[in-house]
Amino acid sequence: MNILMIEDNESVCEMMSMFFEKEGWDSAFCGDGQEGLDLFLTDKESWSMIILDLNLPGMDGMQVCREIRKVSLHVPIIMLTARDSESDQVIGLEIGADEYVTKPFSPLTL
């Protein structure tokens, strides 16, 4: 499994990096929305899953999700965010996320 995590919180990335490594999964991390989108687009077929924060510098997660869905309808996207309102969840799922997980979270649950 090859996971792209677009998340600007370094401690979340470090925790998830250890979890992914323990599971034997390959992963890449990016802390900026635009850079994450660019990384995805360089080889969009290689990613098994995207974990996407909403509050990102460069480009917010909602826009990143929209842009990914323009070129790939099949890569699973999990939004991982502190935004826990029902309206944010509905919007996230409507624009193409497959799951919406709110922080704080358990890596095992994710």
Image (cartoon, rainbow, N blue to C red):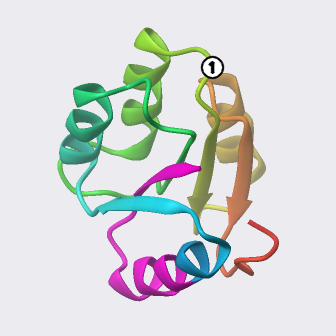
Pinpoint residue 103: horizontal percent, then vertical percent.
65, 74
Pinpoint residue 99: horizontal percent, then vertical percent.
74, 44
Is-magenta flag for residue 11?
A: yes
Q: Where is residue 9, by image quadrant?
A: bottom left
Range of the magenta residues? 1-18
Residue in the image at 47% along x and 37% along y: 47
Pinpoint residue 81: horizontal percent, then vertical percent.
57, 62
- Relative to the observer, which residue lies in front, 105 or 41? 41
Q: Where is residue 80, by image quadrant?
A: bottom right
Name the residue beneath numbered marker 1.
74
- Image vertical order of residue 85 relative to residue 34, above or below: below
Is-magenta flag for residue 100?
A: no
Residue in the image at 58% along x and 28% along y: 75
Residue in the image at 33% along x and 82% along y: 10
Please state, as top left, top right, bottom left or bottom right, where the C terminus lies in the image.
bottom right
- Image vertical order of residue 18 relative to residue 37, above or below: below
Q: Is residue 85 left or right of residue 96?
A: right
Pinpoint residue 70: horizontal percent, then vertical percent.
43, 11
Residue extending farthest to the front is 24
Q: Is residue 76 left or right of residue 46?
A: right
Find numbered disc 1 in the image and state the secondary structure of the residue it sits on. Answer: loop
Residue in the image at 31% along x and 57% along y: 56
Q: Residues within 10 Å of mark 1 (few under 14, many from 20)?
A: few
